[in-house]
Amino acid sequence: MKSYRKELWFNIHQRMEFVNITANVEEALRESGIREGLCLVNAMHITASVFINDDETGLHQDYAKWLERIAPHDPISQYRHNRTGEDNGDAHLKRQVMGRGVVVAVTDGRLDFGPWERVFYGEFDGRRRKRVLVKIIGE
């Protein structure tokens, strides 16, 4: 069995944004040479997420609105975490809801997706450089 590791780096200029990283993950899979196995993709920061869903603008707008309703950024005083000098208590909660990462089966050298599935990086406390880990194992 082989393994392959790659870091993807992002610098999102907005506080919250969803980025389709499917092509980046597919590139890492090609580089790995692995034809059968598993591909882990996860955010390496506690205020970001990796998830799988449809690449549809309306859905992403719905996510942003929904997440802001369940964990609004303002007022920042509502979060005990922010008493440490941070202002990102909401981003931690949003990450918890959206998840840390995903595992995708690799079949015949391709990500084995269902219809419309794509991999996304979700940023909830942007404006600084962050990374995503891609770890592929198999043969």
Image: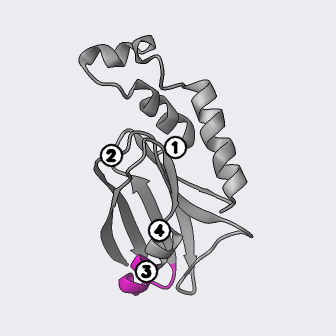
Within 10 angstroms of label 3, few (less than 14), some, or many (20 or more) residues? few
Residue 45 left/right relative to 67: left
- Which residue bears the numbered disc 3? 27
Q: Is 107 rendered above or below residue 17?
A: below
Q: Are marks 2 and 1 in contact (CB under 8 Å)?
A: no
Q: Is residue 55 above or below residue 35?
A: above
| Residue in front for this viewpoint, 132 or 69 | 69
> What percent of the width, then of the height, locates residue 53?
65, 57
Under circle 4, the secondary element is strand
Q: Residue most toward the left? A: 85
Check disc 2 and give the amino acid type.
Arg
Nearer-N-terminus badge (1/3): 3
Residue tagged 1: 99
Classify residue 59 as left or right of residue 38: right
Judged by its main secondary structure, the magenta piece is helix
Instruction: Pick whichever of labels 3 and 4 is earlier in the sequence.
Output: 3
Give the farthest residue toward the right.
115
Tag in front: 4 or 1: 1
Quickly name the residue at label 4.
Answer: 39
Q: Which residues are magenta?
A: 27-36
Q: Amino acid at mark 1?
A: Gly
Mark-to-mark CA distance, 2 and 4: 28 Å
How far apart, in angstroms, are the residues tagged by discs 4 and 1? 16 Å
Q: CA distance from mark 1 to mark 3?
A: 23 Å
For marks 2 and 1, the one nearer the N-term is 1
Q: Amino acid at mark 4?
A: Cys
* Residue bearing the label numbered 2: 127
Mark 2 Cα within 10 Å, few/some/many (few <14, many 20+)? Answer: some
Q: Nearer the viewer, residue 62 or 99?
A: 62
